[in-house]
Image: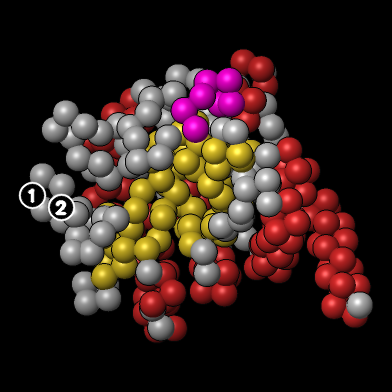
């Protein structure tokens, strides 16, 4: 009974506090359809300057890109895997990507193996992010994503935007879904993160369905693996706390012409 009372008390407290929070510094543009690794195929590598540049040209405001911090090089490498995925036969550094396509765009950095860095390496990585973001005044347009809230907190404490990535179950598992969403919400609030991220789920069995939307109504959300469904894209475009989303799962999908700018004007 004590645990139940503490749990519901914390949920109530966190909801009250989140309702008072000002998330205006988190991305809130009308171009909500971002790109995952760019528009690729037909000889164009994903996570490359060419693929990401192509998506930006088509209207994408931001990109989700896979990065790893190389402890020996003390630098960020654009790659989903290790050994590193090469682009045009060579390793692509994040600084090179920023220099090529960083102007006026946002970067959702899917930070691989973040929790594997010790304190000294973490501080070196943070400093490197500050260094490579100075040229294009990028610091406020970088969002660091990871599922480890305590490790991620170091980046948030330094002044960077953070995305707390979560893995809730579909809403069809009603009790477990509610429990997980509320626990994630607590970690999000006490970590002072910028946005929460999650897989949307299936079209007929969503994770970010009606009940989850209500539980997270005061939390800015980034969504990924969105089903390729234009009606769903339009529906999510209208939700205030859905700040950005990515359509498709390991697919090169172009919905970047869609936005809510006219409706917001």
**Contact flag, marks 1 and 2 (Cβ < 8 Å):** yes
Q: Is residue 185 magenta?
A: no
Judge whether residue 161 can be spotted in this image.
no
Q: Which mark is residue 199?
A: none
Q: Say above or below: 160 vs 148.
A: above
Please state if 117 lies on the left or on the right of 45 as rendered.
right
Rendered-image quadrant of the C terminus: top right
Quadrant position of residue 50: top left
> Horizontal and vertical percent for residue 143?
49, 53
For label 2, count other residues whose C-alpha is less than 10 Å away and answer few (under 14), some (14-19) or many (20+).
Answer: some
Residue at 56 percent across and 26 percent down: it is 233
Q: Which residues are magenta?
A: 227-233
Distance between mark 1 and mark 2 Cα atoms: 5 Å
The residue that mark 1 highlights is 89
Name the residue nearer the viewer: 17 or 215.
215
Residue at the far top in the pictured view: 262
For label 1, count other residues whose C-alpha is less than 10 Å away and answer few (under 14), some (14-19) or many (20+).
Answer: few
State the SS at label 1.
loop
Residue at 41 percent across and 55 percent down: it is 110
Q: Which mark is residue 86?
A: 2
Judge whether residue 240 can be spotted in this image.
yes
State the SS at label 2.
loop
Name the residue nearer the viewer: 19 or 29.
19
Rendered-image quadrant of the N terminus: bottom right
In this figure, what is the number of numbered marks? Answer: 2
> Horizontal and vertical percent for residue 115?
44, 74
> Horizontal and vertical percent for residue 188?
66, 62
Residue at 56 percent across and 57 percent down: it is 167
Residue at the far left in the pictured view: 89
> Horizontal and vertical percent for residue 159?
55, 63
Please state if 23 lies on the left or on the right of 226 as rendered.
right
Residue at 20 percent across and 40 percent down: it is 45
């Amino acid at each position: 009974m004590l645990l139940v009372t503490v749990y519901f008390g914390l949920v109530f407290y966190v909801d009250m506090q989140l309702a008072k929070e000002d998330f205006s510094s988190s991305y809130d543009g009308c171009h909500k359809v971002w790109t995952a690794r760019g528009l690729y195929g037909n000889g164009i590598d994903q996570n490359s300057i060419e693929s990401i540049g192509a998506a930006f040209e088509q209207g994408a405001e931001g990109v989700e890109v896979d990065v790893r911090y190389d402890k020996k090089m003390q630098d960020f490498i654009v790659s989903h895997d290790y050994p590193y995925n090469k682009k045009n036969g060579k390793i692509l550094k994040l600084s090179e990507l920023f220099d090529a396509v960083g102007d006026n765009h946002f970067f959702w950095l899917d930070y691989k193996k973040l929790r594997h860095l010790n304190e000294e390496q973490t501080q070196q990585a943070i400093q490197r992010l500050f260094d490579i973001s100075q040229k294009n005044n990028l610091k406020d347009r970088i969002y660091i994503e990871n599922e480890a809230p305590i490790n991620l907190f170091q980046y948030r404490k330094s002044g960077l935007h953070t995305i707390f990535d979560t893995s809730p179950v579909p809403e069809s598992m009603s009790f477990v879904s509610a429990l997980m969403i509320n626990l994630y919400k607590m970690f999000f609030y006490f970590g002072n993160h910028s946005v929460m991220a999650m897989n949307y789920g299936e079209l007929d069995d969503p994770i970010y369905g009606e009940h989850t939307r209500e539980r997270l109504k005061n939390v800015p959300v980034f969504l990924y693996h969105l089903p390729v469904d234009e009606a769903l894209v339009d529906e999510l475009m209208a939700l205030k706390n859905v700040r950005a989303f990515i359509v498709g799962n390991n697919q090169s999908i172009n919905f970047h012409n869609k936005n809510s700018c006219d409706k917001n004007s």
